[in-house]
Amino acid sequence: GDIAAAYGMMALGTAGFAPERTVRAQQLYAEIVADEGFGQVLDSTAMVSRNCTAEDVANTAYYKTARYTTEGPLHLGAVLAGAADEELERLSAYARPLGYAFQLQDDILDLTGDPDKTNKARGKDVLEGKHTLPILMGLERADSQGRARIEAVLGRGDASDEEVAEIVDLLASLAVFTDAERRVEALADEAKRALAACAVQEHSRKRFAQFADYLVRRSS
């Protein structure tokens, strides 16, 4: 990752854009890399804390995911094209909810996805003790016995597949996944509505809308 980040900075410096745009883009790029690093710190601290809150989850999703997956890349392209700060804000209105949707879909797939498609063991986040939004929703909705079952497996790296499956079944019985999927769809819709104010060509607007739809449907 560090090597790729360095190559990215080098590419910006040698791409041949106007000097003032290059300097602005390189500063932005450095901020994105730093923010993503901060997101990784949150992912390994706040997310595994027993005191983790929905606000912690949202902050982690922004810095770890939205900042470098959706918002940052759009801002970089816009800066190199000469966009003003006001246009970056309009792009953020599309990119931020989309980044949150991307992360929430990841969290859902961690528990419900096909390991052959996701390329990771089911419940990896649970075994690592991460309080993703589905887990927080389950802890909030479950009775005392259900919460005890979740907490008994959360962060236990040696938990069996059967124990993880029991947690998944419990969350499903509490309508956690149904409501989380609705949240993903709502975030994607929010992002698509924001496209109307963005100064992009119509074919790009359609592609951005298609990308939002893809996030809702993806299975890996």
Image (tube, rainbow, N blue to C red):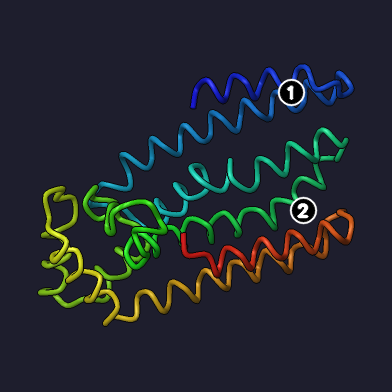
The residue sitting at 49% across, 27% down in the picture is: 1
> Is mark 1 in CB contact (under 8 Å) with mark 2?
no
In this figure, what is the number of numbered marks? Answer: 2
Give x and y (percent) for residue 67. Answer: 58, 43
The residue singled out by tag 1 in the image is 12
Q: Which mark is residue 90?
A: 2
Task: Classify mark 2: residues with Cα within 10 Å, few (<14), some (14-19) or many (20+).
Answer: some
Task: Classify mark 1: residues with Cα within 10 Å, few (<14), some (14-19) or many (20+).
Answer: some
- Extreme residue in the front direction: 116
Q: Is residue 108 above or below residue 40?
A: below
Q: Secondary structure at mark 1?
A: helix
163 and 59: which one is in front?
Answer: 163
156 and 39: which one is in front?
Answer: 156
Give x and y (percent) for residue 159. Answer: 12, 55
Q: Is residue 4 above or below residue 160?
A: above
Q: Identify residue type, mark 1.
A: Leu
Q: Secondary structure at mark 2?
A: helix
Q: Quadrant of residue 185?
A: bottom right
Q: Identify residue type, mark 2.
A: Arg
